[in-house]
Amino acid sequence: MTSKRTRTPLRFLFSFLALAVLPVQAEPLRLALTNDDGWRSPGIQALASAFQAHGFQTTLVAPLNQQSGSSAALNTNKVTVTRQAERTYSAAISPTEGAEPLVAGMLAIDIATALDGMPPDLLVSGINQGANLGSASQHSGTVGAVIGALNPSINGALGGIAVSTDEPKCDAACITRHYADVAEFTANLLAALPTPLPAGVGLNINYPPLPKSAIRGVKVVRQGHTFPLGGRAMRLDFRCDACATLADGESAEAGMRPSPDASLPEDSGDNAAFADGYITIVPIEGDYTADNFARLSRQLGKAIRKLP
C-alpha cells in the first residue's frame, strides 16, 4: 500500500502525521476492544489475534451476541459481565440478550484501566460484518461504540477506531483470510502512528471485500450522504399504510421499505471511494457540531506511507 496509487488529491488523501517532530510510540499500545457482532464473531477475534501478534495489550469486552444497528444506545439497567478467557469478556443485560456495543466498549475501557492501573490508549470497535458507509454510519453499533469513547461525559474521552468490511463472496476459508487481512491492516496502521489518536478523535475505517492485491490504496474522505444497500444509494421509508385508519386497540404492520432513489445527490465521499476499491477512513468526533476533517487530513500521511 505504499505505491503511488495511494497519492490521490490532497483533500481526499491521508497525510497522517505530517508533523515529523512527533515522537514515535515507545511503549506497546494498550487497547480496549469491542464490537456489535458478539464476542465470538470472526471479526473481533481476528483483531484480537493481530493485536497480540503486534504486542499490543488488549482487553476485549463485547456483547454476548449480535447487537447490530444499535447506534450509540445505552443500557441503564444491570449488565452482567462474564470472563471467557484472559482479558476476554462478554456483556449481557439478561441471560440471553447482549449489552449495547457502546456499553460493552465502556466496560472494556473500565476493565483495562483496572487491570493496568491506567486508561487504555484507544478503543477499537470491529471488525464489523458489513461496511458502515455514508449515512448508514449513524445507525451502526460498531461506530456507536466509538462515539461513546470520544465523549468526555462517558468514562472520560479517549480516541477510537471503528473497523468494518463487507464479506467477499467466497468459501469459509477465504472469508477467514479476508478478516485476517483487515485485522493486519488495522494493526499496521496503529503501529505506524507516531502517537495514539487524541482523546475525542476517531476514525471510521471501511475495507472493501477484495483481496490485498486488488486494494487500490487508502483514502481519507468525508462521510458520504447516501444510505448504501447492496452497492446502491437507497431511500429508506418507514411506513404504516393502515395506521391512520385503525380503531382503538387495533394493530397493523409497519416497517422499513428501502428503494433505489435516483434523486439523491451524487455521492463523492466514502461510498464512492469504497466502491472504487479503496480502504476509506473518515475522521469523526463525538461532538456533532465539529469539523476536524481538514486538520486530520493534513496529519495522516506518514503513517500510510509506513504501511507494508
Image: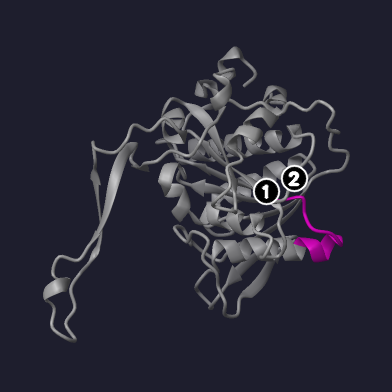
Q: Amino acid at mark 2?
A: Gln
> Nearest the camera: 237 or 11?
11
**Residue occupied by mark 2:** 52
Q: Please report the residue visible at 44 percent of the width from the left and 58 percent of the height from the top.
A: 69
**Which stretch did the figure color magenta?**
112-122
Q: Residue 83: percent from the left, percent from the top? A: 69, 68
Left or right of 129 in this view: 49: right
Q: Residue 19: percent from the left, percent from the top? A: 78, 28
Asked whether the beta carbons under mark 1 and mark 2 sit within 8 Å of each other, the answer is: yes
* Occupied quadrant, residue 80: bottom right
Q: Is 106 placed above or below 24 here?
A: below
Q: Is residue 114 magenta?
A: yes
Left or right of 151 in this view: 211: left
> Nearest the camera: 251 or 164?
251
* Occupied quadrant, residue 272: top left
Task: Please rate how many residues cluster around mark 1, counting C-alpha atoms within 10 Å: few if below 14, some from 14 to 19, many from 20.
Answer: many
Q: Is 66 placed above or below 224 here?
A: below
